[in-house]
Image: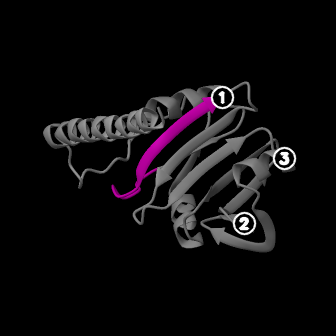
Amino acid sequence: MGGVAGMKGKQTVWDMVRSLAVIGVVVAGIYIFIPHDEKADPTHVVDYRVETITARRAAPYPVAAPVGLPAQWRATSVTYDRKAGNAWHLGFLDPKGQYVAIEQSSDASAKHLASVTQKAEPTGQTQQIGDLVWERWEGEKYDALVRQEQGYATVVTGTASFEDLGAMVAALEFKQGAQQ
């Protein structure tokens, strides 16, 4: 009897190995015959013009959007959420593949700023870009340039260097209402 049970166990393992081999061949066949391009950029680029116009009409503050950035800057996400403190978000990949986000909100609380900067903290240093002075924040994940105005905050944050965060800030145009 022990011999039959032993044979059954070997047979089950062998059946499983054969099944896995068949599945592997099928998967390999699918991979070979479905077209794919290793050089293709998986970045999904978004057009943010309509959302910018909408946010500028709805927000109680001047909404920031970049003008004249080189084509290597690619917008990857855009949202405006009136219910969440009139939160405006515009995310980009910079020319080096680093993430840069514009985050604005009428919620300028420490909790909100910690959230959008991935817990970056003020360094006590400032950076003048154009006519405006921005606070430099540093964190483990993101660094940020932060500007707190009466009733709202603007944050340019991400994995990019302060130089590239500054390039985004320099390109920002602040508008409110129906003006284009």
Q: Nearer the viewer, mark 1 or mark 3?
A: 3
Q: For the residue carrying disc 2, how many other residues have a C-alpha within 10 Å: few (<14), some (14-19), or many (20+)?
A: some
The residue sitting at 57% across, 63% down in the picture is: 159
The answer to whether residue 81 shows anywhere in this view is: yes
Residue most extreme to the bottom? 125
Residue 132, by quadrant, is bottom right
Residue under label 2: 139
Q: Which residues are magenta?
A: 67-80
At x 42%, y 66%, the residue is 96
Q: Is residue 143 above or below residue 81?
A: below
**Label 3 is placed on what type of residue?**
Lys
Colour mode of the rendering: one colour
Disc 1 to disc 3, how far (Cα)?
17 Å
Which SS class for mark 3?
Answer: helix
Q: Position of residue 162 (x, y in %)?
A: 59, 70
Is label 2 or label 1 in front? 2
Instruction: Report crowding for label 3: few under 14, some 14 to 19, many 20 or more residues within 10 A (C-alpha).
Output: few
Mark 3 lies on residue? 111
The reply to whether the C-beta atoms of the residues labelled 2 and 3 are less than 8 Å apart is no
Q: Nearer the viewer, residue 112 or 39?
A: 39
Residue 57, x across and y down, in percent: 60, 27
SS of the residue under disc 2: loop
Q: Is residue 102 above or below residue 87?
A: below
Q: Which of the marked residues, 1 or 3, is nearer the chain's N terminus? A: 1
Q: CA distance from mark 2 to mark 3?
A: 15 Å
Residue 45: % across, % down:
38, 42
Name the element at disc 1.
strand
Q: Is residue 177 visible?
A: no
Q: Please name the amino acid that badge 1 sits on.
A: Asp
The part of the image, by quadrant, that contains residue 129 is bottom right
The label on residue 81 is 1
